[in-house]
Image: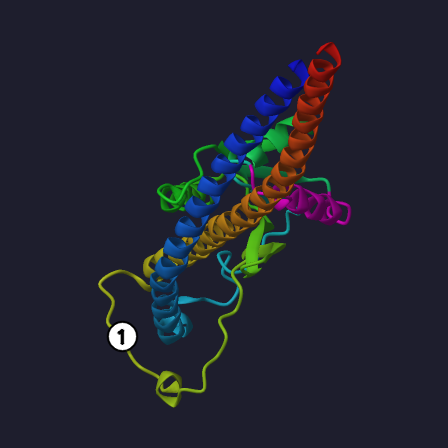
Amino acid sequence: MAQLITMRHRIKAVETIKKITHAMRLISMSSHSRLKNQKKHLETYRNAFQTLWRKVENVLVEPGSDTTKSPQNPHRLIILTGSQKGLCGPFNSMLFRFFEQEMLTQPSSQSIIAVGKHAIEYCRARKLNMIASYNDFTTARFVTIAQALTDLLIASPIAYSQVTFYGNYQKNFFIQRPQATIVFPLPDMPKQEDQQLQQPVEYLFEQSPEELGSTLRHLMILITLQELLYDSLLAEQAARFISMDNSTRNADNLLVSMKLEYNKARQAAITQELTELSSNS
């Protein structure tokens, strides 16, 4: 009888876990759908800015400008972005393995900014040169974090030779991959075949070309960071859905086997009691 009671408690515990994982699966799917629908606005904003940049870049960017070319000092800045919450399968471990492999081929003079709770814990556990951290990495805060990162880069007394963003992106809904993206030096914009953009146009600026160019370049860094952070959040929700879906399926399979064992044990106990009663009579 004690064995049956223990088995019933285990079955109830697995059923409770199944309810939790099923609920988290639904929440992750809902969050992913919302983020995916909202991403088109971020892409529209980026495309509009790139069109504006192509129109005025020849006027604003001076040859040899230190805002487009990296300095001679080989000091790198790394932005490592993990998830804020757990229960998302190999989302973080896959990123950290990729990061460690990349670091084997990089110079030792580098600083790290960690975004997300798991990235912060990773950097602290390995005692990396972490100069800043952002712990509250959520969909409501990614714009604020991107702005803070941009402000930090602009106000930094160190002229970084390269700023690299390490994070996950969503190859498709079922596959997430880590990637390294160079945020600075600014990459060249892809040229378009639109002849209208190729025609020289004279612009009258209220600001000086240097001041306006600096503002636009900072804005380009901000938009890039916003999109990279958003991609990480989108991939995180997909990874969490897959993890919770697998957990729910495993709980279902475990419940089937546990209930089968429970019924066998219960039937054996009933048979034993009937045998004892018939023997006594």
Q: Of residues 142 and 92, which is closer to you in this image?
A: 92
Magenta residues: mostly which secondary structure? helix
Q: Position of residue 198 (x, y in %)?
A: 40, 85
Residue 88 shown left or right of residue 273 in the figure: left
Q: Quadrant of residue 250?
A: top right
Q: Quadrant of residue 69?
A: bottom right
Q: Identify the residue shown where x is 52% and y is 48%.
A: 241
Q: Identify the residue shown where x is 25% and y is 67%.
A: 205
Q: Position of residue 11 (x, y in %)?
A: 58, 29
Residue 118 shown left or right of residue 50 in the figure: right
Judge whether residue 180 can be spotted in this image.
yes
Judge whether residue 132 can be spotted in this image.
no
Give the residue at the far bottom of this rendering.
Answer: 195
Give the residue at the far front of this rendering.
Answer: 281
- Count numbered badges in the picture: 1
Q: Of residues 31 and 2, which is closer to you in this image?
A: 2
**Image quadrant occupied by the N terminus:** top right
Three-letter amino acid code at disc 1? Tyr
**Image quadrant occupied by the C terminus:** top right
Q: Identify the residue shown where x is 72% and y is 49%.
A: 102
Residue 42 shown left or right of residue 118 in the figure: left
Decide whether residue 106 is among the magenta residues: yes
- State the scheme by which the image is colored: rainbow
Which residues are drawn in magenta? 87-107
Q: Identify the residue shown where x is 51% and y is 30%.
A: 16
Q: Position of residue 186 (x, y in %)?
A: 51, 60
Read off the residue under disc 1. Answer: 203
